Image (tube, rainbow, N blue to C red):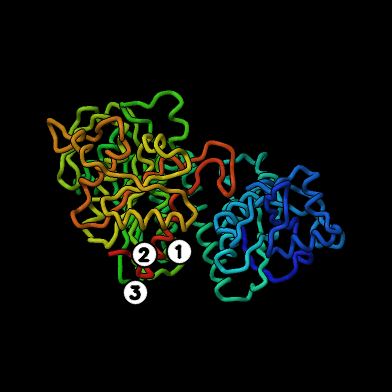
Amino acid sequence: MTALTLSNLPATTVPADAVVIGVAKGESGPVLPAGSPAAAAADEALGGTLAATLTTLGAKGTEDEITRLPAPGGWAVPLVVAVGLGAEPTDGYRPEALRRAAGAAARALTGSEHATFALPADDAEAIGAVAEGALLGAYAFTAFRGRANATSAGAALARITVLDADAGDEEHAEAAERALVVAEEVARARDLINTPPNALSPADFAAVVEAAAPEYGVTAEIMDELALKDGGYGGIMGVGQGSATPPRLVRVTYTHPSAAATLALVGKGITYDSGGLSLKPVGHNETMKCDMSGAAAVFSAVVAAARLGLEVNVTGWLALAENMPSGGAVRPGDVLTMYSGKTVEVLNTDAEGRLVMADALARACEESPDALVDVATLTGAMVLALGKRTFGVLSEDDAFRELLHETAGQAGEQSWPMPMPPELAEGLKSPVADLANVGERMGGGLSAGLFLKEFVAEGTRWAHLDIAGPAFHEGAPYGYTPKGGTGSAVRTLIRLAERIADGELAP
C-alpha cells in the first residue's frame, strides 16, 4: 500500500518525482486558487505567467483536468502537475472536490514513485480529504498480472507527501491516519471484488477473512455447509446448492470495552452469479464476480472500526455463496424454508441475493443490535432508477434513512433515499408459500427491499443499501474511482460507525 506522510516544508524543497498543485476554473481560463502557496510559488518563479502558461497548454481548470509542465529551475522536483478544481467557491473547497482532485492527480502519476500534494487545504478535514483522495487514486490491482506485464509503468504511487503548514498539529495527524486506514480498507474491498471467481470461492473468501482477522483484533466465526444445513439456513443453502463450491456464513466481530451501542452489518457475498437456472443472457455475466461487493464492504468496514478503535461494537455477517446452474441447482418453483422459518417460493433463481441476505438478516436480529444495515448489489432496477454512481437507501424508519443518506454525503459517496411502497408487497405473495422471491417488475428495487424487511425483527432499526450501480465501474477512471471494483459503501459504513460511536444514532 502507498505510504503517507505530512510535511510542512515548502513545495520547492521536497524531493519527489512531481508536485501536485490545484488550479481553479475562471471565466476565461485557469486561475490560481486562494490559499495555495505552492501555486503562488510556481507563479512567482515563472514571472507571474503560470495561468497564461497553463492556458497555452490547453488547461481550463475544470474538475479532474490534468496538465503537466516542467518545474521552475531550482525546485527539488522535475515536474509540476496542475489538477483542475472547478469553479472556486467563496467559502473554500468542499472535501469531496479536494478528494477527487487528489485522486485524479494520483492516477495521472501511475508509474511514479513519490509525489507531493500541495492543494489548497489548511484545516484537518481538508488535509484528510486530500490524503484520502490521493491514496484512493493511487490504487492498482496487479495480483494476476504475468511477470512480463508486472512493470513499474503500471505501479501505483509508492509514496505520497501531503504538504501542510500545520503538519505537527495533532488533529491534522489524526486526519491523515484516518485517511490511511479508510483508503487501505477501501483497497481491501476493491482487491476482493477484482479477484476472479476461480480464485475467490465462498470458502476462499472465508479463508481470507479468517487469516486477516487476528491481525486487527477481530474475531471470525465460519459456518460451513454442514453447519448451515443443520442450522436451517435454507436461503443460503438453496442458492449455493447448484455449485461445486459450497456456501459459507461468516460472522466477523469487533468489540470495544467502552461501547454503548452495537451496529450490525450484513453483506451480500455471491462470489459469482450466473443467474442459476434462470441463466443471465450473454453480455451480463462478465462482471458477475462483483456480486460479493456488499460482503467485501462489510468486512472492510469492521476491520476499519477496529483499526480506528471506535467506541462501538460492530458485527459483520458475510453471506457467501456461488449461484450456478447444475442438476442440483434450485429450480424455479421450488420452495425453500428460511432460517426464520418462513417459506419462500423461488420464481427466479437470479433473484438469489435476497435469499442469502434474508437468512443473514434473521440471524443478525437475534443479537438485538441497536442498528442494522445491509449492503448488496441487489437489483438492476436500482441501476435503472439511480444510474451507475448512486446507491439507494431504503428504510421505513425515516430518521434512520436520512441518517444513512447524510452519512454517505459526509463520506463522499452518492446516495439517494428511496421509498418502500406497501402496495408493492402484494406482488410478493405466493399461492404455495409465505412469500415469493420476486414481485412486480416495475419498482423491482423497492419490492426487493420489502422482501428483505420480512426477515428483519420488528422494532429493529434497519436500512438497506442497494449498491448495484456504483459497486463496479466499467468505464474510464475518474477522480479517485478506478476501473473495476470501487469499494462502494465502505466509507459510508465507516462514517456511520463513527457517528454511532459519538452517540449520533437518532432515537
Identify which amino acid the numbered label 3 is placed on: Pro
Q: Nearer the viewer, residue 354 or 326?
A: 354
Helix, strand or loop at label 1? It is helix
Identify which amino acid the numbered label 1 is placed on: Glu
Residue 501 x %, y %: 37, 68
Asked if marks 1 and 3 touch (Cβ < 8 Å), the reply is no
Residue 117 x %, y %: 68, 60
Crowding around mark 1 (Cα neighbors within 10 Å: few <14, some 14 to 19, many 20+) is: few
The residue under label 3 is: 257
Helix, strand or loop at label 3? It is loop
The residue under label 2 is: 254
- Quarter that holds the C terminus: bottom left
The numbered mark at residue 284 is none
- The residue drawn where x is 66% and y is 39% is 149
Quarter-of-image position of residue 141: top right
Q: Nearer the viewer, residue 24 or 176?
A: 24
The residue under label 1 is: 215
- Asked whether the viewer can see residue 428, the reply is yes
Residue 236 versus residue 182 in the image, above or below: above
Q: CA distance from mark 2 to mark 3?
A: 10 Å
Q: CA distance from mark 1 to mark 3?
A: 18 Å
Q: Nearer the viewer, mark 1 or mark 2?
A: 2
